[in-house]
Image (cartoon, helix red, strand yellow):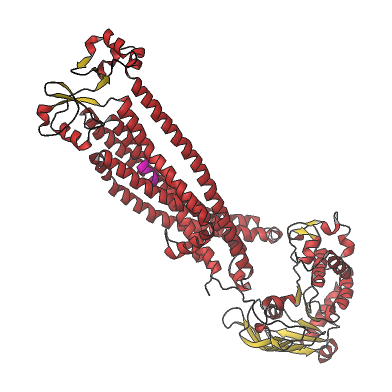
Amino acid sequence: MRHFTDSDVEGGKIYDSKLFKRMIRYAYPHKHLFIITAVLLLFTTVFQVITPYITKTAIDRHIVPGYVKVDLTKAGDVKVSGIPIKGNVLLIDVNETPKHVVEVLQARGAIMPGRYVLVDPNVGRAGEVIAAHPEIFEKIPEKELYIFPVNKTSLLSRSEITALRGRDIRGVIKYALIFMVILILNMVFSAIQTYALSYAGQKIMYDMRKEVFGHILKLPVPFFDRNPVGRIVTRVTNDILAINQMYTDVLIYLFRDVLMAVGIFIIMVKMNIRLSFLILLLVPLLVALTAWFQKAARKQFRKVRKAIARINAFIQEHLGGIEIVRLLGAEDVVTKKFDMVNKEYYDATIGLIYIFGTFRPAVELLRSMGLALIIWYGGGQVIREALSFGALVAFISYVRMFFQPIIELADKFNIMQGAMAAAERIFGILDTPAEKYDGKTLSDVKGHVKFEDVWFAYNDEEWVLKGVSFEVKPGQTFAIVGPTGAGKTSIISILLRFYEIQKGSIKIDGVDIRELDLRFLRRQIALVLQDVFIFSGTVRDNIRLHSGEIGDKEVLEAARYVYAHEFIKKLPDGYDSELGERGLNVSVGQRQLISFARAVAFNPKILILDEATSSVDSETEHLIQEAIKKLLKGRTSIVIAHRLSTIRDADQIIVLSNGRIIEQGTHRELMERKGFYYYLYTIQLGMNKAS
């Protein structure tokens, strides 16, 4: 059996395929939501990738004119089409000319400096503007078209520029509208995607919490001996939340980041291969930086998880025992111990912050270096007419987008690391074998209990019970006494199968309890402990423990039976009065009476009283003893008590010492022997008289 211990927090990989497959299993019932999210994410990714390209197109086609003059004598054998101007000069649109042709023309110096706007005098007021400024316009022979250089635009008024470039202005408006539509669609798709992903994540957490908590309820008692409650609570809450973050913040978005990086690089290569490979020069530095971050963050993250597990367990333990801390005046000592645990968590967290604080600025520096390279080299190409201004602007946007997933890697790594560590701990719980509830059931339980040469140890062969044998016949009251540590409570624990015995057998009505269905076995036995546990809720709910088989009538009868009705009806809302955490708004004696009513309501065949009256005053104890006489009628009862005066009427009494039965008989028989029982009884009698 795998033991879930504190060492689990030190494990954990950034990715564990086995754990990942087990986590993905919880997503299968909601795969339609993930498919919807993935499709929408594909669209939003495409939208993000194409927006810089739309900007480039708007700039190159309508903001910065694409017409240039080409000297055909320098073009050589390059076949290029355009509008003849004069002699060997041709007017071409570089945006419409194949890219490889433009690159050859640039390399040969065939493209003449300057950009031109092509004007049709028959459109709008263009003819009037040409007539007003004939010195800056050049007519194209054999065509009713004119061109003017962009660097002469300052000689025109705003209305004249509008008249000449109406087509470009309409083009800019068109691309602006396209840009706006894409932004709106991106917003709508992102909202639907976020909702679907969050909904799926919440459903997964719901299913996991249900499964984990249901499994915890079925785990054997030794599991809870090894694991503090605070740590188990953390598993059901924080750890499941950490796994949910992997589903909602990493899993789908990791796919988006890869898709975006590939898409961006393809577009950049298509626009300008030299600039694209210039960015690739930074990749080795980026890979080295990421490798350092993963190694350092993983090591530090383990320290943080270990520290937070300790701090949670410490707080849970000491708040649970706050009365003892105050009783002993140990507030200062506990505070100092907490400071040590808190300091460990603080140091671990600061170390993690240092790693993150180094990684993020370093990636930002690399991104800034990439932008600097683009501006330096790309700007030079724009000046030399080797790259369009729109392409440079798009490149700057793409470089920012290309590095963004790397910058977000720190958060994703943190989430993924936490999810893997959390999954390891959660599956550690789920892999712990639960108690087996299948087995026999008996049609009519008489309550005949028999221990036959029972040996039991909590750890290996450190025997707590050594060859214990006794028999409790149906309807008998059987008492167990002995000094602290003799093994009295252990007998109850193994009878309820909270722990399994190593040797011997325990039988009920002649059937070994290991053959019985666990739920059936425990439903036949009611256990009343000295330290009564009260759940938050009403008095009524605490008596019937949410059992649908016990109605209000049975609750009332049970309370009357043990004389609890009198104090309950005096509470502000009677049976509907809310009991605070652990029942601190009622007295110890009243909590004891509620536990008796709880035992009666379930109508057990076997009743176990473990120091059940030790915390009740004499008057209440007398009432309870009277109720017990009625309660025990027709039931087998086992009573463990240090107050020997409460068991004088028991049918049989055994005396335990060091895990063995050293005496057995009735009260009178044991007193006549003047053995260990006589010694204990006379000492208590003397102490009671003295008090």
> Residue 576 in the image: x percent, y percent?
82, 57
Q: Is residue 133 above or below residue 303?
A: above
> Residue 312 in the image: x percent, y percent?
58, 58
Say which quadrant the C terminus sits in.
bottom right
> Residue 47 in the image: x percent, y percent?
41, 40
- Find the magenta span and give its range: 401-406
Let me know if residue 555 is in the magenta part: no
User: Does residue 135 appear left or right of residue 240 in this picture?
Assistant: left
Q: Is residue 530 above or below residue 468?
A: above
Let me know if residue 403 is in the magenta part: yes
Q: Is residue 687 above or below residue 342?
A: below
On the question of residue 11 being in view, the answer is: no
- Along the line of sight, the residue nearer the viewer: 35 or 463: 35
Please state the total of marks drawn on the protein image. Answer: 0
- Along the line of sight, the residue nearer the viewer: 669 or 178: 178
Q: Main secondary structure of the magenta part?
A: helix
Residue 464 quadrant: bottom right
Residue at 43%, 52% in the rendered image: 413
Residue at 80%, 64% in the rendered image: 591
Residue at 33%, 49% in the rendered image: 289
Q: Is residue 686 above or below residue 201?
A: below
On the question of residue 629 being in view, the answer is: yes
Residue 313 quadrant: bottom right
> Residue 542 in the image: x percent, y percent?
77, 63
